Image: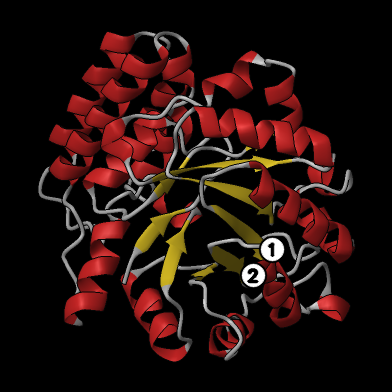
Amino acid sequence: MPVIMAPMEDITDPSFRYICKEFGADMVFTEFISSDGLIRDGAKSLKKLEIYDHERPIGIQIYGHDKQAMIEAAKIAEDANPDLIDINYGCPVRKIARRGAGAGMLRNIPYMIELTRAIVDAVSLPVTVKTRLGWDEASKDIVAIAEKLQDTGIQAITIHGRTGTQMYKGVVDWSLIAQVRRNPKMHIPVIGNGDIDSPEKAATMVGTYPVDATMIGRAAIGKPWIFRSVKHRLETGNNLPEPDIGEKVKIAREHFEKSLNYKGEPRGIYEMRRHFVHYFKGLPGFKELRIKLLTTTNTDEIFNLLDVIDKRYAGLDVNSGK
């Protein structure tokens, strides 16, 4: 079963995508990109369009509310030559949703369908959608919504098992994702997303609720080997051992090198900080080293700190913390 890397703002840049592909992610996505930013030639948005052949298959995800802006953005994204274009109807962040974009689109299903059809008609690449169960508990109509989206001509749908108002809190519900998959009227792939944070959880979810693929997001931050681990569990029923400290340092070092290559200094340093925190989360007595990793702006010092971590925690049982 394919295991896919979810698009995440300020996370799924080329350096992170590179590492996730190394660990077996079957498909990756860019960070989500504002349609307004693209059509206004915003430097940050245009930078996100940079993709590389070693990342394929890769999708570019766009979001927005205005139909004409979204159509133009989809065409600009198509010119970057991804393998598909994904529409974000799932981001619950208030500043996006309150403008009617992201998960906010779930409050206006007729317009969501109209917009999706317009984008499908405007580009020649496959178009997919990522969305949620509904806007709130009173509107969890994803089975009907998925049918209507399929009718627009999209090639696949990813469903996060929460509503828009839940944000990332509360219990994720894969049962409705499974209902979409079991619907005899559905013929496009249905991808399940939400709270897959371990091989065991993946096996439970996929074994209980049928989907065509699974998508992993936040659990991959600082743990990109999760793709390899989940695929191994789904294929064999067995778990792979957790990487030891030496392996984690090696992965973090390669990730940091890629970040510097793609973004230079100081941005490549600043944007690795959120990853460093997660790579070494839970190490005993790590506070002092963590502070240094999160504050230094000297590249050589950061590499030296990684060497210190490697030596100090060599032989640590990563599963027990001892």
Q: Which mark is residue 150?
A: 2
**Residue at (28, 45) in percent of width and height:** 21
Q: Secondary structure at mark 1?
A: loop
Asked if residue 57 shows in the view, the reply is yes
The answer to whether 245 appears left or right of 195 in the picture is left
> Distance from label 1 to label 2 (Cα)?
5 Å
Q: Nearer the viewer, residue 57 or 44?
A: 57
Residue 231 is drawn in which quadrant?
A: bottom left
Q: Is residue 67 above or below residue 168?
A: above
Display colour scheme: secondary structure
**Residue at (27, 21) in percent of width and height:** 257
Q: Position of residue 79 (x, y in %)?
A: 52, 28
Q: Secondary structure at mark 2?
A: helix
**Residue at (54, 37) in percent of width and height:** 31
- Split into 4 quadrants, where in the image is the N terminus? bottom left
The answer to whether 308 appears left or right of 227 in the picture is left
Residue 263 is drawn in which quadrant?
A: top left
Q: Nearer the viewer, residue 77 or 278?
A: 77
Q: Position of residue 295 (x, y in %)?
A: 47, 18
Q: Is residue 207 above or below residue 2?
A: below
Q: Is residue 248 above or below residue 204?
A: above
Task: Indicate the amino acid at tag 1.
Answer: Thr
Asked if residue 280 shows in the view, the reply is no
Whether the residues at callouts 1 and 2 have beta carbons within 8 Å, the answer is yes
Q: Position of residue 78 (x, y in %)?
A: 54, 34
Q: Which mark is residue 139?
A: none
Q: How many other residues sit within 10 Å of disc 1, few (<14), some (14-19) or many (≥20)?
A: some
Task: Indicate the amino acid at tag 2.
Answer: Gln
The answer to whether 168 appears left or right of 283 in the picture is right
Q: Please give the residue where the numbered disc 1 appears in the rendered image.
A: 152
Q: Position of residue 237 (x, y in %)?
A: 20, 82
